[in-house]
Amino acid sequence: MSWQLRVVHRTGYHYTLPATTSYNEARLTPRSERGQTVVASRLDTTPATREYRYTDYWGTVVSAFDLHEPHTEFSVVATSVVTTSGPVSPVRTHTWADLYRPDVIDAYAEYLQPTAYTPRDAQLDQMAHRLSARTSPADAVFALTHWAREQLTYRPGSTGVHSSASDAWAAREGVCQDYAHVALVMLRAIGIPARYVSGYLYGEPRAEPGRTVRGESHAWVEVWTGGWWAYDPTNALAVGARHVSVARGRDYADVTPLKGVFTGGGTSTLDVAVHLTRLG
């Protein structure tokens, strides 16, 4: 079953003193790909700026822009309409022996290595090997992500954008970013290439068309077991019609929705609002 979703993601900066210049990169634009088709997308800034758009190394659409006039507020509004479809079935073509072939390890090395957000962890490593000992790679994905979900408590505010999987695991709590990072640590520990995906999740599975809900950015993982497929460890849910994917990478650092620098401006505050509407 397919859905059509409109996503409006607004980010606003407020400065205590006028900022004289600012340089920004936004990763807020979905791409047409398997499972979703972009009907329309636009990005607006206030004050208005000139946008330079490119695709980064990981395949994410990036909007770069800078502002060279004094301003005390700056907002970015990304609006997209996307048609989505049901989940892709797990890929079960490869065995453990296939995943451990040198050519596979070489081809997907970037999705097998630890990162600052997903460092090696002896306890998670040991549990990942134990849970996957008598199962196939595809089934191991479910075993590891479900176990991690049972161990963590979803608690908004308990971690921040700079928290690593080790931070969340030590606290046994976090949000979707942390669930994804913990899952990545465990999947990579047993040799399954895995990457971080950012996007959105429409939170009401039975909503009628026309219903708008307040949301936020969401995160899940994609794994390679002979082909790429996605799973949402926070909700123990196959990624499907209610998900809109935007960016991919090794971890959160590769998919940050909006980042930049400014001169002047004193201190700044940030507010973010995301609204999703089911159109059909």
Image (tube, grey):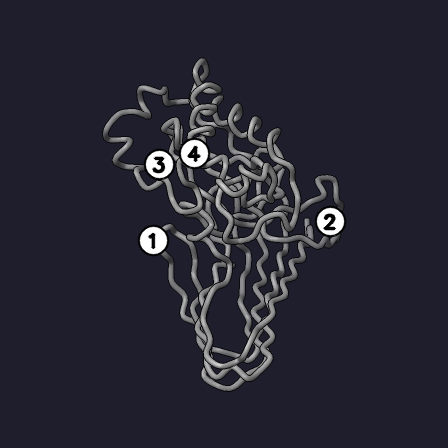
Q: Which residue is mark 1?
A: 57
Query: Which of the two discs, 3 and 1, labels the residue nearer the N terminus?
Result: 1
Graded by Cα atoms within 10 Å as few (under 14), some (14 to 19) or many (20 or more), the crowding at tag 3 reads many
Callout 1: few (<14), some (14-19), or many (20+) C-alpha neighbours within 10 Å? few
Q: Amino acid at mark 4?
A: Asp
**Residue placed under numbered mark 2 in the picture:** 209
Q: Residue at x 49, y 86 (%)?
A: 69
Q: Secondary structure at mark 3?
A: loop
Mark 2 → mark 4, Cα distance in angstroms: 44 Å
Which is in the foreground here, disc 3 or disc 1?
3
For residue 60, side relative to residue 273 (left or right): left
Residue furthest toward the left? 102
**Foreground label between 2 and 4:** 4
| Neighbourhood count class around disc 2 (C-alpha, 10 Å): few under 14, some 14–19, many 20 upward | few
**Disc 4 and disc 1 in contact, CB within 8 angstroms:** no
Residue at left 30%, top 38%?
A: 109
Res 121 label: 4
Q: Which residue type carries mark 2?
A: Pro
The span from disc 1 to disc 2 (Cα, nearest Å) is 36 Å
Cα distance, mark 4 to mark 3?
14 Å
Dot in front, 4 or 1:
4
Among the two numbered marks 4 and 3 on one chain, the one whose residue lies closer to the N terminus? 3
Q: Earlier in the sequence, mark 2 or mark 3?
A: 3
User: Which residue was labeled with disc 3?
Assistant: 112
Instruction: Look at the numbered disc 2 and give the secondary structure of its residue.
Output: loop
Residue 4 - label: none
Residue drawn at x 76%, y 46% as measured from the top left: 208
- Using the numbered discs, state the Cα–Cα distance from disc 2 to disc 3 in whole angstroms: 40 Å
Q: Tag 1's secondary structure?
A: loop
- State the CA–CA distance, disc 3 to disc 1: 17 Å
